[in-house]
Image: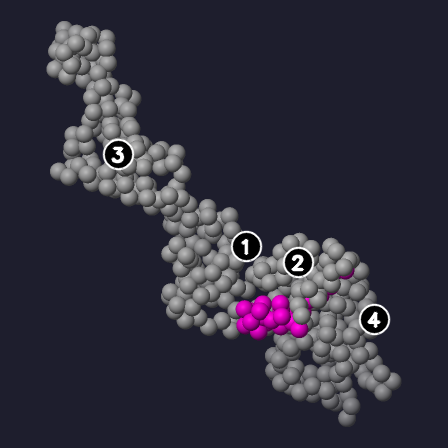
Amino acid sequence: MESSILIESFAEFAKFKNIDRPTMIRILEDVFRTMIRKKFVTDENFDVIINVDKGDLEIWRIREIVDDEFAEDSFDFDENKHISLTDARKIEADFEVGEEVAEEVKLIDFGRRLVMTARQTLIQKIKDLEKDILFQKYKEIVGEIIAGEVYQILNKEVLLLDGEGNELVLPRSEQIPKDRFRKGDSARAIVHRVEMHNGNPKIILSRTSPAFLERLFESEVPEVYDGLISIKKVVREPGERAKVAVESYDDRIDPVGACVGMKGSRIHSIVRELENENIDVINFTDNLELYIARALSPAKIGNIKIDGDEGRVSVFLKPDQVSLAIGKGGQNIKLASKLVGMEIDVFRELSEQEEEDVDLSEFSDEIESWIIEELKRVGLDTAKSVLALTKDDLVRRTELEEETIEDVLSILKQEFE
């Protein structure tokens, strides 16, 4: 039998330098003591000596010397704990009753099957420890950016490898819609969360999280990294648009200018990483009206009415500013609402020429209230403002069905015939 099998496993285990010495010794001793108990019932009178650096193992059994009569006739005699004087003197001639004998137990004495079982146990403990170390390592860096190499592209996720060959998962739901990966590409993302699935750690990445954009600002803008500029809030429509509210703790520093950089040098690298996501950097203020106005940039705001109890804001704009405030597909107003933490309703300020226009609420007997509310949500609060848009524009801007929009247009047209 090759008694070196367990020693080889031990040496393999000792190579893991990121495992601290006490943990290594504890696991190894536990494996060997389990092996001892299986053969000798108890391990109380055994010493296990492990040399982690050299991969050496010594197992010593310590037994008390008893007289031959006790060894032959007493029911209390336990050959695992006791040794007769005659047998002891075969080891060393001057032994006496009451002394202790230490004998080295060789691996070959345990039998091949027991050694193989111990080896398998040790390998499993190594794997379990590796998994635990990996889980704890990534648990500590949740929210931080990591780079990985793409090695497999699946329908629902992309698999990457970190620098140590550990598998990282970037689900489709956490990818920017414009992301296109090829095997061998290097990709950056934040560690979104770490989970255990059937005893195996699963490291899930994200490129759509607001935290990813925040970490990118920290890496590209020294003032953010140093804490001179604080990022108050980030809201995103990944790959399309984002708004970032920033505040400076130093009056000499313009937070927006510092984040954008000379000729946009700092913001451009972030935009490229995010597949040309349009990023609005906004100067944070405790003045809620001013903050709302800045959040709706690039639109110029007229009047603002805030209903704090309802958590709603009514914003009045000139007709040519409504589409800017709402943005493509309603993105601008949606992000602005998230940024300020209130629901924003946009209304057009009527000019003298528009006075003959009719407010949509006047049609409540013909058009259901929820349809009117949906139109008002995207800044269409009068009949003519709705009729000024095509059916396709209304389908794109609202969440109304095409058939519903056709009915609305028909009702409104009759008003001016």
| Mark toward the start of the polypeptide (1 vs 4) | 1
Q: Whole-Å distance between the Cαs marked 1 and 2?
A: 20 Å
Q: Quadrant of residue 290?
A: bottom right
Instruction: Identify the mark at residue 56; answer none if there is no mark.
Output: 3
The reply to whether the magenta stretch includes residue 269 is yes
Residue kind at label 1, given as amino acid type: Gly
In this figure, which residue is indicated by the disc labeled 1? 143
> Mark 3 or mark 4: which comes first in sequence?
3
Q: Residues within 10 Å of mark 4 (few under 14, many from 20)?
A: some
Label 2 with label 3: CB-CB less than 8 Å = no
Magenta extent = 263-285
Farthest residue in the right direction?
352
Q: Is residue 32 left or right of residue 70?
A: right
For marks 3 and 1, the one nearer the N-term is: 3
Rendered residue at 62%/80% (across/down): 396
- The first of marks 1 and 2 along the sequence is 1
Q: Earlier in the sequence, mark 2 or mark 3?
A: 3
